[in-house]
Image: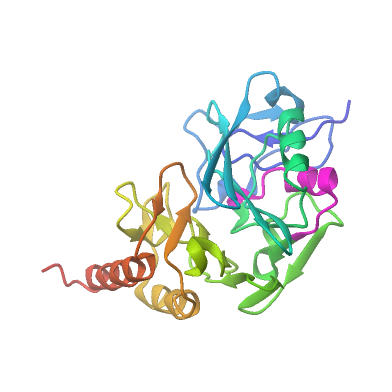
């Protein structure tokens, strides 16, 4: 029997096969990890009976959804509603009937965009369910484990999906690491949906920059400077991060700048 298998550690889906893959290249990379007990797999269909997606509205037009109980990395995805269409930002593995009905009731999807390969999960299933293209940066093409005709690779440092919705390549955590800039968010002061290209810390007043979060390996100072040049050129008041509660709801542009400056100081040995 052919099955789509999911990696239990990162949630990545693999092409139909009678047996799980021999390994998960995404977890074998130093930016992720293989659990101490070894790589484990499950069939995609087995998620539905034991998990559900919880929803939260953050501001007018912006919702997040996150699987409960936690699965894999446990990131949240965002549904952004705009006059030009709806975007699914980042992705989660579970796409059940309730989620399909809710997304359809909110207008479906016009596009899917994902910050980096750790959150590719079952993007192919979401694209098929809603007839939406998937926008991924071409610099990360090697991490697409389940090729699909809905995937559209883009290049360069920015891609405008439609007016007011722009994908910005920050790099950092992955060469194609991307954030989404929503110009009309936060009452037209601007919002960044950041994944963990910009990692909002638990206190929600600092941003961290890492090569590997689970292995606590920092980015070099030069890469942080390049990331800041690309991301900070646009106005934004708020940043919504990858995990529950990790949002900077005011003065986010200043918080990002101050965090980057301090991070670089520490990397360069200035602790005072």
* Residue lying at 79% horizontally and 35% vertically, measured from the top left: 4
Q: Is residue 121 above or below residue 187?
A: above
From where the camera sits, is residue 120 visible? yes
Residue 41, image quadrant: top right
* Residue lying at 29% horizontally and 72% vertically, measured from the top left: 264
From where the camera sits, is residue 14 visible? no
Q: Is residue 240 above or below residue 154?
A: above
Q: Is residue 9 above or below residue 131?
A: above
Check the image and tell me how it is coloured.
Answer: rainbow
- Of 137 and 159, the residue lying toward us: 159
In the image, farthest residue toward the top: 49
Residue 154, image quadrant: bottom right
The C terminus, quarter of image? bottom left
Magenta residues (range): 118-134
Number of numbered tags placed on the structure image: 0
Where residue 235 appears, as percent x and y from the top left, is 46, 75
Where residue 27 appears, as percent x and y from the top left, is 57, 45
Where residue 99 appears, as percent x and y from the top left, is 71, 34
* Residue lying at 84% horizontally and 35% vertically, measured from the top left: 17
Residue 126, image quadrant: top right
The N terminus, quarter of image? top right
- Of 222 and 128, the residue lying toward us: 128
The reply, left or right, for residue 173 in relation to residue 260 is right
Q: Is residue 42 above or below residue 138?
A: above
């Amino acid at each position: 029997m052919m099955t789509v298998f999911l990696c239990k550690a990162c949630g990545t889906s693999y092409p139909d096969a009678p047996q799980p893959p021999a390994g998960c290249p995404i977890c074998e990379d130093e930016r992720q990890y293989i659990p101490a007990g070894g790589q484990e797999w499950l069939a995609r269909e087995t998620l539905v009976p034991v998990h559900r997606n919880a929803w939260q509205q953050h501001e007018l037009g912006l919702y997040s959804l996150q699987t409960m109980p936690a699965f894999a990395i446990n990131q949240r995805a965002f549904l952004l509603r705009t006059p030009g269409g709806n975007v699914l930002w980042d992705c989660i593995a579970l796409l059940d009937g309730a989620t399909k009905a809710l997304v359809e009731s909110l207008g479906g999807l016009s596009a899917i965009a994902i910050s980096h390969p750790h959150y590719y999960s079952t993007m192919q299933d979401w694209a098929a369910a809603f007839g939406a293209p998937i926008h991924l940066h071409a610099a990360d093409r090697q991490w697409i484990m389940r090729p699909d005709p809905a995937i559209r690779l883009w290049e360069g440092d920015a891609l405008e999906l439609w007016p007011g919705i722009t994908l910005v390549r920050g790099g950092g955590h992955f060469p194609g690491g991307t954030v989404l800039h929503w110009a009309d968010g936060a009452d037209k002061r601007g919002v960044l949906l950041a994944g963990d290209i910009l990692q909002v810390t638990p206190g929600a007043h600092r941003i961290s920059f890492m090569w590997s979060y689970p292995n606590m390996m920092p980015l070099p100072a030069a890469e942080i400077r390049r990331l800041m040049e690309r991301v900070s050129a646009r106005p934004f008041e708020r940043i919504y991060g990858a995990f529950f509660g990790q949002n900077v709801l005011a003065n986010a542009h200043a918080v990002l700048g101050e965090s980057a400056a301090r991070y670089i100081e520490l990397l360069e040995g200035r602790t005072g």
